[in-house]
Image (tube, rainbow, N blue to C red):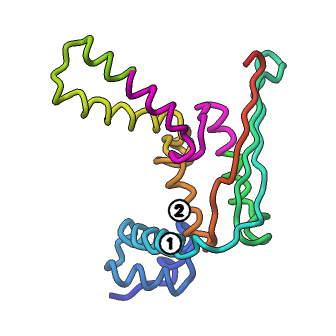
Amino acid sequence: MSISASDVKKLRDMTGAGMMDAKKALSENDGDFDKAVKSLREKGLADSKKRADKEANQGTIGDYIHYQQDRAVSGVLVELACETDFVAKSDEFKNVAKQVAMHIAALKPEFLNIEDVPTDRIDEEKDIIQKQSENEGKPKDVISKIVEGKISSFYKDYVLNEQTFCNPEFYEGQVGTMIEELSGKLGEKIYIKTFSRIEVGS
């Protein structure tokens, strides 16, 4: 089918893809924008995995201060890393860093990745869940599934990259997936390197 220049421009505006990539995605998906966006995202995510070993020694600091009655009560700093100064200075990259800082302020994650959660913390959670289930009279063959499900929920509550992003108007999905998609869109290795949150009275 014939793909118009306006259709290519529209898809490029939606995804940030190159002209030829956008045209190819539309052609391969019979002009269906949703399918074209999906295919570009999938290709972007695949490309981001190939960049896993590359150096990402550029980036920016996202910051957010929360006020109550004209008084700062909590603050967040987050380092969003990338490969080049060009991407680090882009408005989109800096905006995502800001959005992630706001998310951290709102949802208060304790860890960046699942691997960062101490083993003793998980063992303690599992022990509590198991004892609660036993006290509720749950069958033994069901308890292991309950423990597995609640540990998965624990990660979604306390691990930044596993959390659902707090502002669905900006992005619907997990924080980690949002960063992966940004990596695919901008064509560089991008990841959250570290974050810090402080709160009055904590």
Most common SS among magenta residues: helix
Q: Residue at the top extreme?
A: 135
43 to 81, vertically: above or below = below
Residue positioned 50% across, 55% down in the render: 177
Instruction: Give left or right: position of 53 versus 89.
Output: left
Instruction: Give left or right: position of 140 versus 133.
Output: left
Question: Which amino acid lies under the numbered mark 1 shown in the image of this protein?
Answer: Gly
Residue bearing the label numbered 2: 181
Q: Are marks 2 and 1 in contact (CB under 8 Å)?
A: yes
11 to 119, vertically: above or below = below
Residue bearing the label numbered 1: 44
Residue 105, magenta (yes or no): yes
Residue positioned 70% across, 67% down in the render: 56
* Pick the front one: 154 or 164: 154
Q: Looking at the rendering, which quadrant does residue 182 occupy?
A: bottom right
* Pick the front one: 171 or 125: 125
As helix, strand or loop, the secondary structure at mark 1 comes to: helix
| x and y percentages locating residue 121 in the rendered image | 51, 31
Q: Earlier in the sequence, mark 2 or mark 1?
A: 1
| x and y percentages locating residue 161 in the rendered image | 54, 47
Question: Which amino acid lies under the numbered mark 2 shown in the image of this protein?
Answer: Glu
* Pick the front one: 105 or 133: 133
- Quadrant location of the N terminus? bottom left
Magenta stretch: give its range.
100-127
| x and y percentages locating residue 117 in the rendered image | 54, 39
**Image mark count:** 2
Mark 2: give few (<14), some (14-19) or many (20+) Cα within 10 Å: many
